[in-house]
Image (spheres, grey):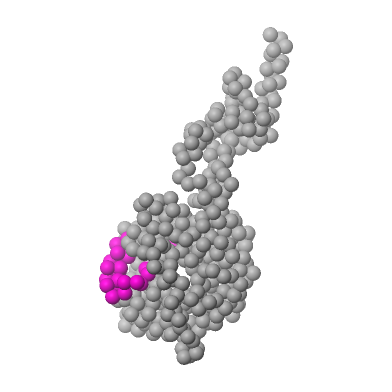
Amino acid sequence: MITPESVRVSGVSRTEEIAADPNRVIVFDTTMRDGEQAPGFSMTAQAKVKMAQVLRDLGVDVIEAGFAAASPGDEDCIRRVAGEVEGPIFCSLSRANEKDIDATFRALAPAPKSHRRCHTFIGTSPIHRTAKLKMSTNEVLSTAVRSVEYARSLFDDVEFSAEDAFRTEPEFLADVLEAAADAGARTLNVPDTVGYATPQEVRERFAALAARIKKRHPHVIFSAHCHDDLGMAVANSLAAVEGGARQIEGAINGIGERAGNCSIEEIIMALKVREDRYGVTTGADSRHLVRASKILCEITETVIARNKSVVGINAFAHEAGIHQHGMLADSRTYEIMRPQDVGFEGSWFVLGKHSGRHAIAKRAETIGRPIEGERLAAVVAGFKQRADQIGEINDAELIAIIDRVDGVSEVVAQYA
């Protein structure tokens, strides 16, 4: 056990500096902890450093770099990240015991004291208490308090999570969270650990907890950590913001246990595009979102769906003729955000069977083969026939179609 007497706690953390703005949402990235726990997403120390660097560029406030007590290797990975990357708050998950908290303290030692966070948790739902922990409600509450008090003796910045919060009795959940705040936790995480909740439940639960706990702890930060088992992680996280949460936890590309976590890229852009509704901001530089997504795919040797929100290759691609016509007139007809805002170079048209005359003519002009009138009509007819056969039409195919039309026209002209 690390003796608290050997640790000098300054009392001022980076989290408190950020939270001074009541309309600022703290972005907490758990790509390298909850994300890495999912099968197929393990990362080496070098990979974690690379990922942390792009997350820093993205402007993520908190990076949960791992679970130090999980293995000596994980502790070493966190130590490397905390020592080689500057800027964000670095965090490690800890179960509610001194051994785990000590491992977190060792792992985060290279980071400045004001940029270290201990994240400790215990299950609070009936199923977790009986099946996993074999503890009574009183035992869970007292264990939570002891772990937070010990963590607070070593860290300025302590986050407490009530695991499986949304299957926990509301009154007991409030009791545990308030006791954790009394013990010194400055961030209270209310995780939907198994993706069970709905947006209305989330909004109401956060509002009720804030109404009770902020009377005694006005500066405590409520955090949302939502899983996507029912496909509602982002919607639930946004509902949490409406209920008073000022920290959102998630992962790049939405990776994580089972169906994954709230997608960081989606929550950042939802709050940015719909600032009119939510009235909050983040410190993220969204232009690095595509790069962060691609680097994670490279590190983990995985791919994301073409239609993945924000960062998928189809997110700013257009094939339908009506859409392409609208885009040619004004991109705002079918795009609610600029591709450059997330890191793409621009929008692009995919020429296929759904494309219309305007898009085909525009692409032909772009490649130096302008067409109009009857010639355009003939090219469109040939284009549609070929697109039904092969799907997407690239520039070489379009040129071949134009050449065939022009060749037929020349033959007809000779015998006219």
Front residue of this view, candidates 240 and 339: 339
Against 338, residue 50 (above or below) is below
Q: Is residue 277 above or below residue 83?
A: above
Q: Quadrant of residue 414?
A: top right
Please name the residue shown 53% across and 60% down the image: 58
Where does residue 287 sit, x and y in percent of width and height? Answer: 54, 54
| Residue 212 x/y as whole percent | 27, 71
Residue 335 coordinates in the image, percent (x, y): 48, 43
Pick the quarter of the image with the C terminus.
top right
Report the number of numbered marks: 0
Nearer to the camera, 134 or 167: 167
The verdict on residue 212 being magenta is yes
Report the side of 371 relative to 105 (left or right).
Answer: right
Q: Residue 159: in sight, yes or no?
A: yes
Please provide percent x and percent y for residue 244.
33, 63
Nearest the camera: 251 or 369? 369
94 to 312, vertically: above or below? below
Q: Tell me what residue is drawn at x 55 percent, y 64 percent.
A: 56
**Chain part drawn in magenta:** 203-227
Q: Residue at x 43, y 85 (%)?
A: 153
